[in-house]
Image (cartoon, helix red, strand yellow):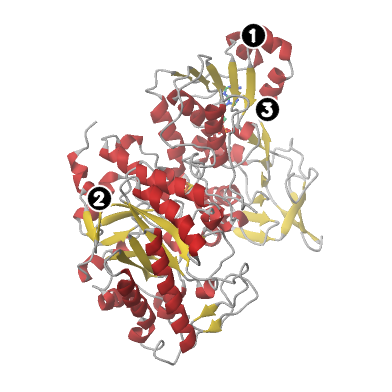
Amino acid sequence: MARDPRYDILFEPIKIGPVTAKNRFFQVPHCTGMGHAMPRALAAMRGVKAEGGWGVVCSEYCSIHPSSDDGTPSTSLWDESDVRDQAIMVEAVHAHGALAGCELWYGGLKTGNPITRDIPLGPVSRPVIPPDPVQTRAMDKADIAAFRGWHLAAVERALQAGYDLVYVYAGHGYLPMQFLSRRFNDRSDEYGGSLENRARLLRELIEDTREAVDGKAGVVVRLAVEELEGESGLTADGEGRALVEMLAELPDLWDVNISTFDNDARTSRFVKEAAQEPYVSFVKQVTTKPVVGVGRFTSPDTMVSQIKRGILDMIGAARPSIADPFLPKKIEEGRPDDIRECIGCNICVINHALSSPIRCTQNPTMGEEWRKGWHPEVIAPKANDDPVLIVGAGPAGLECARALGRRGCEVHLAESTTELGGRVSRETKLPSLAEWVRVRDYRVNQILPMPEVNVYRDSHLGAAEVLEFGFPRVVLATGATWRRDGVGRANRFPVLDPALAQVFTPDDVMAGAEVPGPVLVFDDDHYYMGAVVAEKLRDDGLDVTLVTPAGVVSAWTGFSLEQHLIQTQVLEKGVEVVTGHSLSAYDGTTAELACVFTGKTIERSYGAVVTVTGRHPNDALYHLLADDPAALQDAGIKSVTRIGDCNAPGVIAAAVYAGHRYARELDAPEDAPLRRFERAAV
Ligand code: ADP
Ligand code: SF4
């Protein structure tokens, strides 16, 4: 299909200093959890982005020197071996006509240097921001000179690796920003005091970099123009603006955003598309240089509007490029409805914090491009004509059907209810989760026009029906059900009588059960569900207490950068929060809470308990079938496989991945290597 002319502006080339980007799609730097540990996997992933049409593809943050090490496998340019690793990535990006950008990084107060054990350096001597028991050394003149030398050496290595764009990175609260900020810079020398003084280091870095690139690469300055810290930080109408005015024509491109990372990469629970516009819209008014910014852009109309209204020149994207590496191509080919839109869940961010390879809820191939040879848009045609029956149309079943359909397999997808989507359809009716419905909508929109995929709603299947159909391949994607007995991490034995009318689960709440108040929500799951259920019940007007054995609400969401926002929201809604306690008993009126440290108990009266601890896989159908191989053989069924929550309850990303994996591996030869690993060779 031809491109809609409305979107032509997105495909206009743009000069960035001495180099030219072929279009306006700019994959801004983003972490991958692969970094220096998995250079081949990283290169393949970035190469797929370039293949998908991004005009610029950047690295993740790239440490310039061993004295900036945050303990994660990010990239680095410390020596020649790093140059070789990075060159593979640059080559993969260049192979598809995109520019490669390198984000040179120095953490300062934000790194404890657990791997290298170098003393961290900062504008001042303070405890580092991660809770490592170490302080920075305040940089003296010799340290500043050394730092500039390291930065310069890294610029030269970036050029050696073939990069077209080199970043001076004063964003996300890292060292150059620490110098800019009154909060972290109380120096009395020429690097402290007035804004001009605090900006001295940044100006020097830009000038050094410009001299070193010597017209061979563009110089990008990434600046957080707003910190959401009021007057103690940079503000878009105060020092953030003054800084851009002061340095306006020095870079070849301004990459502007808000700081810190948790503000920049907010989840869809808290912000929508283009949320940074109010903060960055001034930038183009004070510089003639091109400007890139982010806003979890997935709508081509919003992108066009950003450019036409003079907000941005280039559409920056990290998460939308992860969820759909082929987003630009899909717009270019006139099929924007095929875009797999990011849902803003930040599962992709979690893996950086966990030092494990990136994954994505929407894009199951993310991070698997080299390891499993998976491509987001290409999948091998079927190897045989065996039809596949999939039972259950949640994220696992839907993705399995979609991917099998793309392979040309005959698929029969049976769903008990009238609505497709499983847990996604149910959960997205809870407060703030609405955007996650894209997991369902993308797949349903893809499947419905496929002649290979037959969808049956209102079709609850038992073992007899499955055997009667006799489709050779059976996939059970029947999901999971929240437990009623309070068993989870803190309680290893039941503490609730599931028969009590006053005991509820998230499934009951999502099904619209009338929950009497006051209600105790016991969250031993630690992801989003406990807090979301508490919010919903509070919105319904009930008095709600959220009890968790953890030290904070939704503890695991610290990794997705939203824990503090969730806890603030819960408290602001008037939910009472009790941390460090487990629910140890409830008789329908009185709940006993036990301190997880001392075991000391307290008693409180509640009209109901909602228990959010763990889930039972809905695997009864699987066992009925798998435990009767003779019946399967008689029916001509070659395999019965459970996937997703029915196999092991987990996050939505895991269910999507399981569905995709089944489709990929269905007819792989027994001895086919299904994955490979990068290991340091001796
Ligand atoms: P997952 O996250 O693994 O995809 P979900 O719980 O989201 O699991 O989805 C499971 C889906 O399977 C639900 O929509 C449910 O209605 C459906 N389902 C469960 N058991 C059956 C069955 N026996 N026949 C048909 N559909 C079923
Ligand atoms: Fe978007 Fe979630 Fe995928 Fe990250 S993991 S890119 S936030 S859908």
The residue that label 2 is drawn on is 22
* Mark 3 vs mark 2: in front: 2
Q: Is residue 437 above or below residue 178?
A: above
Question: Callout 2, which amino acid?
Answer: Lys
> Dot 3: within a 10 Å radius of its alpha carbon, few (fewer than 14), some, or many (20 or more) residues?
some
Q: In the displayed structure, does residue 436 sit left or right of residue 199?
A: right
Identify which residue, 462 or 195, lies in the foreground: 195
Q: Is residue 564 above or below residue 124?
A: above
Question: Callout 3, which amino acid?
Answer: Asp
Pointer 2 and pointer 1: residues touching (CB < 8 Å)? no
Q: Is residue 480 above or below residue 95?
A: above
Question: Callout 1, which amino acid?
Answer: Ala
On-image quarter of the N terminus: top left
Query: Mark on residue 635?
Result: 1
Calculate the distance from the C-alpha at mark 2 to the C-alpha at mark 1: 57 Å
Percent position of residue 654, x then y: 57, 39
Query: Mark on residue 619?
Result: 3
Percent position of residue 438, x then y: 43, 39
Q: In the displayed structure, does residue 334 sit left or right of residue 559?
A: left
Q: Is residue 564 visible?
A: yes
Residue at the (68%, 10%) spot, across then down: 633
Calculate the distance from the C-alpha at mark 3 to the C-alpha at mark 1: 20 Å
Percent position of residue 64, x then y: 47, 69
Identify which residue, 534 or 169, lies in the foreground: 169
